[in-house]
Image (cartoon, rainbow, N blue to C red):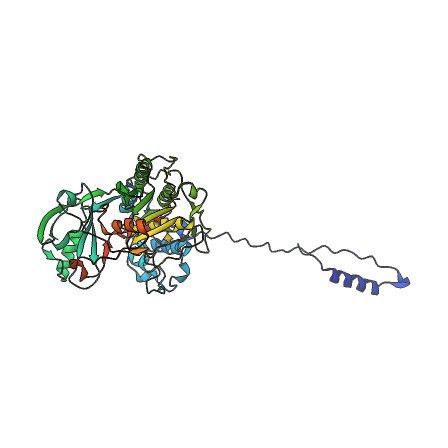
Amino acid sequence: MKYTSPLIAAAVLTLLAACGGGGGSAVTPVNPTPPVDPTPPVVTPPSVPDFLTLANHCATPRQGTQPSGLPYYDQQGTLTEEMRWLRSFIDESYLWYKEVPATLNMADYKTMLDYFAVLKTPAITASGRAKDRFHFTYPSEVWDEMSSSGVTLGYGITWSRSTGAAPRVWAVTLVEPGSPADTAGVRRGDLLAAVDGADVNDSSDAAVAKRTAGISPATVGETHAFVLKRGDATVSVSLAAQKIAAAAVRNTRVIDTPTGPVGYLQFNDHNAVAEGQLISAFGTLRAAQVNDLVVDMRYNGGGYLVVGAELAYMIAGPAGNGKVFERLQANDKRTPPSPQMFQSKSVGLAPGLMNAGVVLPYLGLKRVTILTTPGTCSASEAVINSLRGIDIEVNLIGGETCGKPYAFVPQANCGITYFAIQTQGVNAKGFGDYADGFQPTCKADDDLGHALGDTSERLLSAALSYRANGVCPAAPLRARSLDSSGPLQLVRPEGKEIAIRHR
């Protein structure tokens, strides 16, 4: 409706009075009827992003039944529709969507993987690292199996490799009990000499391809020949690839010290099966009345944040009640998700292995020691940061962590699961600026010459020494066979360095 201004109305009355008839008779003003706008307002319905309308429009639709038993929901589409869906997903949810180059042309890319690879910020941090080092994909079926059950295809070996010039070093870092590698006698600390006849220092394309195929098998039953060095001895083994369900929690034990029992556990993965294994381990440690704890997360690349929230609660106990484990900050298009609180009950990530609502055992510690390397990443770093956020003393023994204060919800479409950073996490004090990693309290190199959990192993020995006297022990020289190639880097799939919101 339109209204007449009081000033205009007064002017109209004055004019009418001045133009009155003979005899000076008064003129009675008439209130005009407000004009009606003949054009109704145009209401524009809110636009629906391609991310919603083009989901499951696939150039090659899948048919049949998913491993979960549900049917596939794919329908016939085009590669362009898949790319439009992907660009919309990035524009809506990616933390740094404003930094993605606007000039990218879909027609220049032949596959979804090529296109996804460029849909990220090109920025570099002050330390010279890429701002986004965690942008990757998985075949959806592979990811679903790995995240829900911890199953991966391989021999049960986790490798570390040198990053410097030749001579190259590939060292066996972990061997999964009961795996093909374990059965064949492969040990932590063994050095790779050759795969299928391809020497580890042969840089020819044929040798590189042969080694890659052997170290990363593609099918169950695939068999490859490995030559390993163990000191001055040579060990030859033939390994057949299997689906390996690795234990997330191992080596739970109690170490007797002059100042009381100290708990130790090796925690390798924040996956769904870890929930029940952690609960069992902390039940054992609580029954032993340990008064201190060493959590070995030197190879833990992360996983579900809620598992980290459960671990942090089992360490801190009631000190975490009602406290923020991690508050996630999203881009300016999205409402930030509810904060992840310290979790005092199980959430039941793996139905059949652990029910939801189980009250968690806790130690109620004011101090904890965590063994770290650059392989300590993402959700593992969130545990460190969150405990410090509620004033639990956290001592780090080993190396600096990887530097990933970010999280995402994996997004599947047309058989590919995409991982694009969506949030940055901060603790209860608002701190989350550790993109270059957490520095250790006491620096020490990883020790492949001893089993994990052995009190003579370098990192655990340093942790017990620092606990006893508050002084970092002098770092011993590394093994000569490794010195020439510099520090070793853990070799693992990108899906092992993640923080995932499960809801």
Q: Is residue 337 left or right of residue 72?
A: right
Q: In this view, does 400 lie to the left or right of 165?
A: right
Quadrant containing the C terminus is top left
Q: Position of residue 266 (x, y in %)?
A: 27, 45
Measured along the vertical axis of the image, is residue 283 above or below residue 153?
A: above
Q: Nearer the viewer, residue 300 or 391?
A: 391
Q: Is residue 3 left or right of residue 490?
A: right
Question: Where on the picture, by quarter, is residue 199?
Answer: bottom left
* The N terminus - image quarter: bottom right
Kindly identify the residue that appears in the image at 49 percent across and 52 percent down. Answer: 46
Q: In this view of the protein, can residue 410 be seen by the observer?
A: no
Front residue of 472 and 176: 472
Q: Which residue is drawn at 84% across and 59% down?
A: 27
Q: Is 176 positioned to the left or the right of 340 in the image?
A: left
Q: In this view, does 352 lie above or below 124?
A: above
Q: Position of residue 188 (x, y in %)?
A: 18, 49
- Coordinates of residue 218 in the picture (x, y in percent): 19, 49
Of residues 98 and 157, the one drawn nearer to the viewer in this rendering: 157
Q: Nearer the viewer, residue 228 or 32?
A: 228
Q: In the rendered image, is residue 364 in sight?
A: yes
Check the image and name the residue furthest to the right. Answer: 23
Q: Can you give x and y, in whole percent of width and height, for residue 456 in the image?
A: 21, 48
